[in-house]
Amino acid sequence: MKCDNCKKEDQWLEMIGKEFICHKCLNKHKLMGLIMRTHMDTFRFVLRKANVQTYQDMMNVDRKTIEELVDLKKYGIFLKTTNVVEIE
């Protein structure tokens, strides 16, 4: 089958709404790609709860939304913080 995003032939595609998307395209979203590679059940749970209908909807899901839906530390997914505090 072909990926609906990049149009390349691939045996393993994930269904995102009505679209079939390859793993390479899914990994373009850094956080969702990490969740998909480590915990597939959690990845599908986030897609359901975030009401993702298309690939573009998935790309627009931000870190805050994901952290509200799932406790990532419970699954052993530790993210680097983006908050940097300069101490003078």
Image (tube, rainbow, N blue to C red):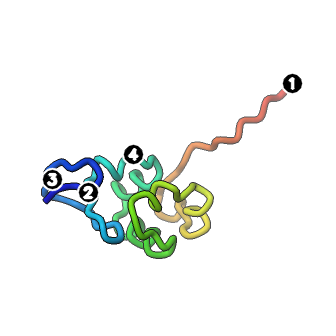
Label 4 amino acid? Lys
Rendered position, 33 above or below 39? above
Question: The C terminus lies in which quarter of the figure?
Answer: top right
Spatial CA distance of label 3 from label 2 is: 11 Å
Q: Earlier in the sequence, mark 4 or mark 2?
A: 2
Asked whether 35 or 75 is in front, the reply is: 35
Please provide percent x and percent y for residue 55. 39, 59
Residue drawn 61% across the image and 67% down it: 68
Question: Disc 4, disc 1: CB below 8 Å?
Answer: no
Q: Which residue is tagged 4?
A: 28
Rendered position, 44 above or below 25? below
Question: Residue 21 vs residue 54: left or right?
Answer: left
Residue drawn 28% across the image and 58% down it: 21
SS label for mark 4 = loop
Label 2 amino acid? Asp
Answer few, some or many: residues within 10 Å of disc 2's Cα (few below 14, many 20 plus, some between 14 and 19): some
Q: Earlier in the sequence, mark 1 or mark 2?
A: 2
Spatial CA distance of label 1 from label 2 is: 51 Å
Q: Which residue is tagged 1?
A: 88
Spatial CA distance of label 4 from label 1 is: 37 Å
SS label for mark 1 = loop
- Residue 10: which disc? 3
Answer few, some or many: residues within 10 Å of disc 1's Cα (few below 14, many 20 plus, some between 14 and 19): few
Spatial CA distance of label 1 from label 3 is: 52 Å
Label 1 amino acid? Glu
SS label for mark 2 = loop
